[in-house]
Image (spheres, grey):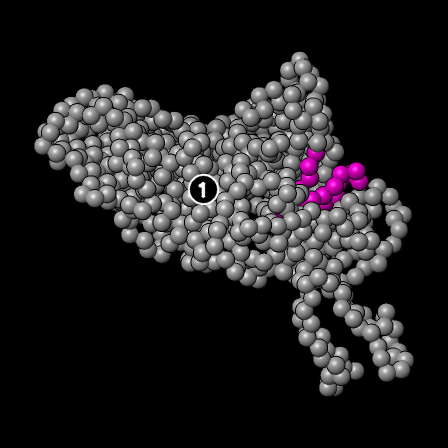
């Protein structure tokens, strides 16, 4: 069997569709049908840098995407890897993985990541043999591959010259999460053997960098005593260097500052046997809590080994002296009435400490005491009630001045921002804390997550099944926005609404400003649109596109489809892959949740597109004229404004007198065109599935539920959606 790896282009679209349609068993028996058209659209909207296909002759039998990783810095990512069910076990997955890895190496990215589902343990040995480590996480199955860093490290490149790293690997492969744990650090180990030479390298999990190299001639390791370090203090890193060669070993150590880690070590030494070198680094203040699953600040050292360099990195988790959060349990407050919010405080020191918090004055509330003092044991968490009187509704934003005094008398001063929404009937206001940009209007809210710029919505304290996902500029589409901080935020609180304008500037589009608008009305309606501003004097050299993905759960949805209103009374049909976007016949979707009905509608001139679990809109602006701004049409989201599909449909159509259309179930069964009387000996029963599914099952007819079946037939139709 001859397998060729090629890059995707449009001429392969029909063959790719055929591959996915023959890969259903490998994806849990999915019933969805792909077509040449669906693949063309999906790939045109993809953020992949490259998409690799495995060919056997003219047949596409494997698929591997390669894109920039949006969840973290310094990595490429494989968003999707597939091999046709009937081609498993033929090493096609290995070929695709190694091709993607080689591209990451060529492009000089330090790392390649991928995810898989928890039950896919049969693929784990393949991933690990290709250089991936399975990260020990409860929330997902995430793997990281550091081979690009290994192969670009000058100090060890000679070991791999003229040899294949894959074939030389002696790493032990086990189907379980990787990592040797030492004092809360996780170390991942590569090992190779080449004739009489051996090489061992350890990577530290959170810093994503080398912390140990061992060869036949030497061993060098870097160790920090503790991973979680309170900022505002100096700490030490220890280098253990062992010369095993009997020849002089020249070592240069040069510290490099990274983020809030200040490190200025300079050391040059000849090592004849074994030596230890201690360096001191300072952990400066942080502005926000470190995300546990993103690359941490590192103690970085350029290590020169007989003139050839290696970069060592040990990640640390910088901590505030105390973790502090304000919690208001009430959904609503009342002016002139007393309430209580709680200060949740965790002592991050390894010793007992006293904390003093000073609250600023505010026109919104009156505190019984402006200062809070509490002594907390090491690593202990306490929740302190703070009584207050509500003077006005709004967002209470409190930059706290905090003093921490340890038992040895050492003092550390720091600030921490907290905030609580003082919500009231009809009150509209905005707020912002370290994590979110927040809009409140009555009992409804919309919050923009600063970590990835997704927008969450909900009522009272409960989030809805609707999320505006991170937009992308292109083409090709860039996911840079997910990791970019806003350059400006403007707010407007008006009569019955609260609005935010959030501005972004992207390195991939240096002449462009992207303005996101969110406008929340007090009746539970959210408006979202964008402006794209060309800041330069001349027209953009390329056409500008905007892609806005949206998570809108189709569980119990009503869809205007093929001229009818198709109802789903359960979760069947809640995957967008089961529906043909071209058959959406009106500009709205609605979810019939009795407690929290949801709706979304868009301009009639815009087209909705379907992905596997979300929908999206594409806006093509063309080449934007100099010093000009273009604007998208608005999308409206009902998170409580409309409680039935008919009134929401009228809103979407901007007409109180809409034409009635037939309501049908997504799986429709009819006998003689709904004629209850059978004339003669033959009746025609039709089964119609509105979804783009392979239709298979059992059909039985009886005169009543208690009587025997008159007809029973098994059916399976892949090409047809209707049986007679």
x and y percent of residue 384 in the render? 43, 42
Quarter residue 428 falls in = top right
Q: Is residue 477 visible?
A: yes
Q: Secondary structure at mark 1?
A: helix
Q: On the picture, is 658 further left or further right than 137?
A: right
Q: Residues within 10 Å of mark 1 (few under 14, many from 20)?
A: some
x and y percent of residue 95 in the render? 44, 47
- At horizontal 28% and vertical 40% (from top left) the residue drawn is 202
Q: Is residue 435 visible?
A: no
Please provide the residue range marked out in magenta.
600-619
| Near-viewer residue (681 or 414) | 681
| Near-viewer residue (438 or 165) | 165
Q: Pointer 1: what residue? A: 99
Q: On the picture, is 79 further left or further right than 156?
A: right
| 612 drawn magenta | yes
| Near-viewer residue (460 or 191) | 191
How many labels were placed on the picture? 1
- At horizontal 15% and vertical 27% (from top left) the residue drawn is 249
Height in image: 628 above or below 619? Answer: above
x and y percent of residue 296 in the render? 38, 35
x and y percent of residue 377 in the render? 30, 42
Height in image: 592 above or below 358? Answer: below
- At horizontal 20% and vertical 41% (from top left) the residue drawn is 197
Quarter residue 21 falls in = bottom right
């Amino acid at each position: 069997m001859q397998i060729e790896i090629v890059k995707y282009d449009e001429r392969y679209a029909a063959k790719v569709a055929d591959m996915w349609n023959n890969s259903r068993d490998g994806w849990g028996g999915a019933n969805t049908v792909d077509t040449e058209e669906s693949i063309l659209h999906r790939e045109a909207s993809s953020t992949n840098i490259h998409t690799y296909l495995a060919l056997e002759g003219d047949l596409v039998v494997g698929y591997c995407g390669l894109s920039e990783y949006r969840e973290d810095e310094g990595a490429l990512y494989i968003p999707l890897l597939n091999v046709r069910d009937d081609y498993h076990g033929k090493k096609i997955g290995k070929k695709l993985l190694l091709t993607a890895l080689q591209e990451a190496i060529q492009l000089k990215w330090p790392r390649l990541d991928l995810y898989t589902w928890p039950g896919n343990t049969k693929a784990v040995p393949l991933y690990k043999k290709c250089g991936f480590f399975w990260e020990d996480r409860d929330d997902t199955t995430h793997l990281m591959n550091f081979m690009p860093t290994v192969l670009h490290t000058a100090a060890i490149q000679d070991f791999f010259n003229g040899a294949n790293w894959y074939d030389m690997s002696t790493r032990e492969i086990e189907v379980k999460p990787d990592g040797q744990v030492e004092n809360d650090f996780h170390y991942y180990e590569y090992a190779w053997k080449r004739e009489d030479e051996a090489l061992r390298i350890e990577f530290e999990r959170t810093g994503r960098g080398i912390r140990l190299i061992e060869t036949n001639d030497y061993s060098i390791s870097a160790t920090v005593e503790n991973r979680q370090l309170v900022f505002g203090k100096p700490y030490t890193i220890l280098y253990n260097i062992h010369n095993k060669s009997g020849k002089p070993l020249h070592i240069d150590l040069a510290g490099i500052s990274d983020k809030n880690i200040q490190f200025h070590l300079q050391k040059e030494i000849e090592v004849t046997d074994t030596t230890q070198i201690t360096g001191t680094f300072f952990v400066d203040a942080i502005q926000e809590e470190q995300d546990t699953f993103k690359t941490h600040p590192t103690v970085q050292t350029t290590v020169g080994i007989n003139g050839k360099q290696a970069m060592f990195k040990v990640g640390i988790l910088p901590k505030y002296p105390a973790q502090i959060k304000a919690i208001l349990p009430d959904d609503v407050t009342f002016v002139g009435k007393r309430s209580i919010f709680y200060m949740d405080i965790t002592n991050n020191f390894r010793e007992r400490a006293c904390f003093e918090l000073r609250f600023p004055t505010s026109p919104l509330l009156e505190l019984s005491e402006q200062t809070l003092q509490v002594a907390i044991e090491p690593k202990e968490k306490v929740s302190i009630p703070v009584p207050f009187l509500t003077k006005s509704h709004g967002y209470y934003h409190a930059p706290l001045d905090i003093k921490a005094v340890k038992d040895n008398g050492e003092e550390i001063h720091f600030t921490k921002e907290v905030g609580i929404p003082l919500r009231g009937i009809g009150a509209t206001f905005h707020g912002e804390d370290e994590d979110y940009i927040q809009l409140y209007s009555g009992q409804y809210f919309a919050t923009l997550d600063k970590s990835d710029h997704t927008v969450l919505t909900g009522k009272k304290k409960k989030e809805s099944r609707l999320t505006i996902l991170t937009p992308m500029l292109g083409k090709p589409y860039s996911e840079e926005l997910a990791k970019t901080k806003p350059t400006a935020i403007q707010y407007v609180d008006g009569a019955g609404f609260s609005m935010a304008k959030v501005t972004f500037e992207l390195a991939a589009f240096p002449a462009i400003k992207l303005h996101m608008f969110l406008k929340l009305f007090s009746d539970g309606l959210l408006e979202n649109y964008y402006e794209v501003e060309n800041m330069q004097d001349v027209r953009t050299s390329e056409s500008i596109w905007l892609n806005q993905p949206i998570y809108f759960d189709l569980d119990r949805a009503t869809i205007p489809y093929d001229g009818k209103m198709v109802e789903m009374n359960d979760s069947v049909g809640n995957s967008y892959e089961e529906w043909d976007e071209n058959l959406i016949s009106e500009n709205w979707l609605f979810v019939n949740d009795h407690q929290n009905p949801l709706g979304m509608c868009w301009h009639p001139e815009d087209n909705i597109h379907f992905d596997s679990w979300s929908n999206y809109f594409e806006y093509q602006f063309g080449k934007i004229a100099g010093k000009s701004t273009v604007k998208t049409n608005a999308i409206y989201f009902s998170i409580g404004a409309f409680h039935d599909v008919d009134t929401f449909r009228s809103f979407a159509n901007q007409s109180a007198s809409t034409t009635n259309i037939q309501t049908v179930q997504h799986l429709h069964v009819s006998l003689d065109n709904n004629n209850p009387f059978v004339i003669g000996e033959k009746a025609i029963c039709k089964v119609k599935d509105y979804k783009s599914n392979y239709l298979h099952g059992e059909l039985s007819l009886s005169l009543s539920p208690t009587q025997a079946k008159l007809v029973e037939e098994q059916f399976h139709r892949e090409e047809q959606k209707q049986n007679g």
